[in-house]
Amino acid sequence: MAEEAKSKGNAAFSSGDYATAITHFTEAINLAPTNHVLYSNRSASYASLHRYEEALSDAKKTVEIKPDWSKGYSRLGAAYIGLSQFSEAADAYKRGLEIDPSNEALKSGLADATRSRGGAKSNPFVDAFQGPEMWTKLTADPVTRVYLQQPDFVKTMQEIQKNPNNLNLYMKDKRVMQALGVLMNVKMSGSGGDDMEMKEADDLRKEPEPEPEPMEELSEEEREKKERKEKALKEKEEGNAAYKKKDFERAIECYTKAMELDDEDISYLTNRAAVYLELGKYNECIGDCDKAVERGRELRSDFKMIARALTRKGSALVKLAKCSQDLEPAIETFQKALTEHRNPDTLKKLNDAEKAKKELEQQEYFDPKIAEEEREKGNGFFKEQKYPEAVKHYSEAIKRNPNDVRAYSNRAACYTKLGALPEGLKDADKCIELDPSFTKGYNRKGAIQFLMKEYDKAMETYQEGLKHDAKNQELLDGVRRCVEQINKANRGDLTPDELKERQAKAMQDPEVQNILSDPVMRQVLVDFQENPKAAQEHMKNPMVMNKIQKLVSAGIVQVR
């Protein structure tokens, strides 16, 4: 709020913190760029820091915005005096007096500007440091005589004598101030303290610091509105404290009072909605959130506040949901919140709601009886060799009962018949995942791997199944077929095309790739060709032996 920033600026100016005052007045100007008082106050702050160029710019802006306001010309004149532009300063004060002829500040400013303009050619500060008389006067004074024994003081006075206009650089040195008083025949007070001031003299009369403009008087209605807002903020703070203490009833009471005092801040509504959410009063929470969104759009509130209200409404809707369909409004509300402001917390709530909806849909769709009926329909189509239709019914059976391994096994068989081996392999793996003792799952998987000519993998699958049923004939037959194919490759009975195909497929196996990229195994393979004695030593290592067997089974290495 511009008025709040302005008040802070006035307080900083009063305390002498002009830089901070400038910051607050600038903030206020950004919020209310046509308020002439704000430029006037900032001009006064700049002038207090001797930044007269900026002071002049703001003074001109003040006059531009409100040319009939005499105070603006006072600021303009002060800035011109600071820049030693006395004619312009006098003109500014005269223009102000045309508006307000009885204004004492303007009269005094005009007198100063006229006097300074008339004496501009003879500067008493400059004259004080001219000629040898300076050293004579300093030697005659008992105080400054002591200072002349200090080399740094003598050097300082010499530099000032060379360029008196640099006197301001040394004004903080109490010795220089004492010397200035001696040279200008002005009695100094407080010579022993840190702060030294000259007694008033006509030539060195200190002008008072410019005061910031007081806040423009508010109307009765505006004052009451401001008071209500302040009371509302206090109620909100008390509500926040009560919320943290989990005194929810007290928090609701405070937020409600705040809303009654100030209906232009929707945070009171969203805060009360948060309390209702904690209390499980979800409908009340939703009501407050809807009001906050509606009122927020009327007031053009911060989009983050709108998003917060929508997010809380979504959370309440999730709590009220009893089925997957009930979660759709919550998901839609979270999505709307994200269009207002993409908040990570809201995004997580959306993802959780979508996940919960999917899980509920699965639970609602779960029906073992219908699943069994669909599986039987699939079996009928399988016997008729209508595999696509069979897949459709097996898939429906899985949706109705995703834990039935038989449906996955049967669908894997259909995929195998259709040549969709990767899909069939996924279903076979799912069988084993759901029930590791279900031997038909191993048989389905081994058969698919055999058709993919991954004989070594098929062998492993069949052998794993035999651990659960050592006499299973289908698994035993699978092992036998794999052994035949592996031995055929070992004997070199494969045609060149078969060997090439098998090797290409083996090279896609990550395990085979790792073996062939291992520098040690590469040396072993070289020794097998060039150094049979070394190869025999390698074969004594069980790990090397297993890797060699893997390469043999894959058709990469042939034993003749």
Image (cartoon, rainbow, N blue to C red):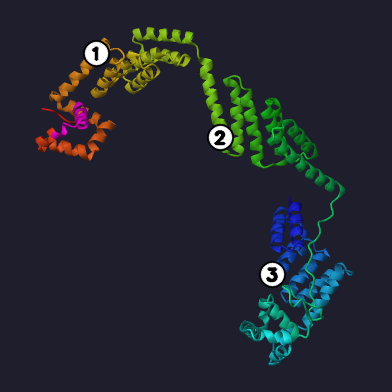
Compared to residue 394, the image places residue 456 above or below, namely below
Residue where numbered disc 1 is placed: 476
Foreground pick, 236 / 540: 540
Q: Compute the Cα span from label 1 to label 3.
A: 99 Å
Query: Is residue 553 part of the magenta span, yes or no?
Result: yes
Residue numbers of the magenta segment: 537-554
Q: Main secondary structure of the magenta part?
A: helix
Q: Residue at x 57, y 31 (%)?
A: 349
Q: CA distance from mark 2 to mark 3?
A: 51 Å
The answer to which image quadrant residue 87 occupies is bottom right
Element class at badge 3: helix
Residue 499 as seen in the image, left or right of residue 299: left
Residue placed at 16% from the left, 24% from the top?
Answer: 489
Amino acid on which the number 2 mark rests in the picture: Leu
Mark 2 lies on residue:
347
Going from the N terminus, do you reach mark 2 or mark 1 first? Answer: 2
Which mark identifies residue 53? 3
The amino acid at mark 1 is Leu
- How many numbered dots are placed on residues in this image? 3
Magenta highlight on residue 420: no
Mark pair 2, 1: CA separation: 53 Å
Query: Splitting the image into 4 quarters, where does residue 302 fall?
Result: top right
Quarter of the image for residue 283 reads top right
Indicate which disc, 2 or 3, sits on the residue closer to the N terminus.
3
Q: Where is residue 120 drawn, in percent x and y?
A: 75, 83
Q: Secondary structure at mark 1?
A: helix
Q: Specify the amino acid type for callout 3.
A: Glu
For discs 1 and 3, the disc positioned in front in the rendered view: 1
Q: Quadrant of the C terminus?
A: top left
Pinpoint residue 387: horizontal percent, then vertical percent: 36, 13
- Percent across and percent down for residue 332 are 60, 29
